[in-house]
Image (cartoon, rainbow, N blue to C red):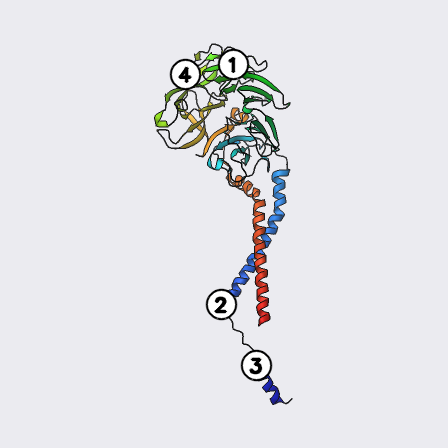
Amino acid sequence: MSERQLAEALRDIADAAVVPSLPDNLWRRGQRRHRRRVAAATLAVAVVAVLVALPLARHRSVAEPVAPADVPSPVPSIVYAPLPWQRTVQQAPVGPAALIVTGEGAFRGSDVFGGNEGRTVVVGRDGRYRLVNGPVEVEAGWDAHLSPDGRFVAVGGPVEGGADAPFDSTSIVDLTTGRVRVYAGNFPAGWSPDGRHLLLHGNSRLVLLDVASGETQHMLGNLADPRIAFAADGARLAVQDGPLLSIVDVASGKRGLPITLEPRRYLAGPGAWTPDGRIAFWDTIAGCEEECRGPAPEVGEFRLSLVDPRSAATVPGPAVDVVRGHVPRLLGWQPDGDAIVQTYHPPHLPGGGERGPQVIALRPGGGQTLLVDLPDQAHSVEVAQDLLRADRFGGAPPLTARLGDWISGLMNPLTLVAAALLGALVVRYLRRRRRGMADRDRL
């Protein structure tokens, strides 16, 4: 073939070739593809880092034995609402608690997601938050009780971790291990001061449960809605049912003659017994009826009074401030004579706006000190008695530690989300890569 023929053949081939058309945004498309590849690689590295760090984080929070934090003031001065996806006691035991809180909103679970509408928020002595979840709504101090040493929570009804527990039962959760023991037939009413016994209420009777052995002892019967308080030494039990007050010898189960109380007088709370053996009551001095949209005995102004359990006579006591709101709960006494009280001011009460529950110290002679402030959504709180008696209040809210603890609990769901995103990016990249190869083959 001559040089001229070769040139003509090449010209014919060139004329027959299809000239590729390049898009106007070819450079921008290349930049976007490069950024996507960099993002996918970065995400892959992040997922690998999370997967490597996850076993270490879980080992620190779950595998190591939990011991009480040796901090000067383990009872925080401020309690916050639980964060989304807060871990449960079963997922990561928190050890002995400083206090427990119940309420609504963030303090209440969801009946839609998991059926855990009941929720008890446990605040550990190192500031970590945990949840005790169950299908039944409970209130701290009424059907959810913290043991004096803060190790156990007794909750009415079934809870997570207690398999096949009936609704008319008591679930005792060990906060150091997450294990649950179930006692059917009764609901919790309060712990003895030494924490060895738990008083149960059900079928109109009171039963004393030995927590270690599981043995029970009948105490009282024919009770409608009792209020109870153990004496400081645990030897006697004060039980108010309506207008009648009974003093029961715990060892024998015998009770003295019932005492008829004055109208609108209420046993002050689980800490009603004073160290010298008198019993504190709340006297309603200003009831609130129609304007409070509720019965007079529940909302109003209340003054603390002391009664001699032998003579049933009102005796001189400390002149403390009048408390306004729902009937307060006396949680206990401190060596300096301060009465530690939980108050709650409902939003519809005249004279003030909505305010969450507070734990305050009522000082003899007047005056009060705010010890624990809680969110508006909270309803009630119970403080570990060993911390209350030792005046271990005033802890700084450990926001940084709490945030870190919460993030470590999110490692599992974050890993799943990151893996899903990475998978989606890889699938999309492979798809675009196959499409690009097919385009090149057509060209």
Q: Nearer the viewer, residue 110 or 30?
A: 110
Mark 2–mark 4 Cα distance, whole angstroms, equals 86 Å
Position of residue 342 measured from the top left corner of the image (x, y, whole percent): 46, 26
Mark 1 or mark 4: which is in front?
A: 4
Question: Which one is in front, 383 or 252?
Answer: 252
How far apart are the two marked residues, 3 and 4, measured between alpha carbons? 111 Å
Considering the numbered disc 4 on the image, is that residue within a helix, a strand or a loop? loop
| Disc 2 crowd, CA 10 A, few/some/many (<14, 14-19, 20+) | few
Q: Which residue is mark 4?
A: 263
Is disc 1 placed on a helix, strand or loop? strand
> Mark 3 or mark 1: which is in front?
3
In the rendered structure, find residue 247 and report the number of the disc placed on it: 1
User: In the drawing, does residue 243 fall left or right of residue 150?
Assistant: left
Residue that badge 2 annotates: 25
Residue named by callout 3: 14
Q: Is residue 274 visible?
A: no
In terms of image quadrants, where is residue 314? top left
Give the side of residue 321 with respect to residue 207, left or right.
left
Instruction: Indicate the position of residue 212 as horizontal and vertical percent values.
Output: 63, 24
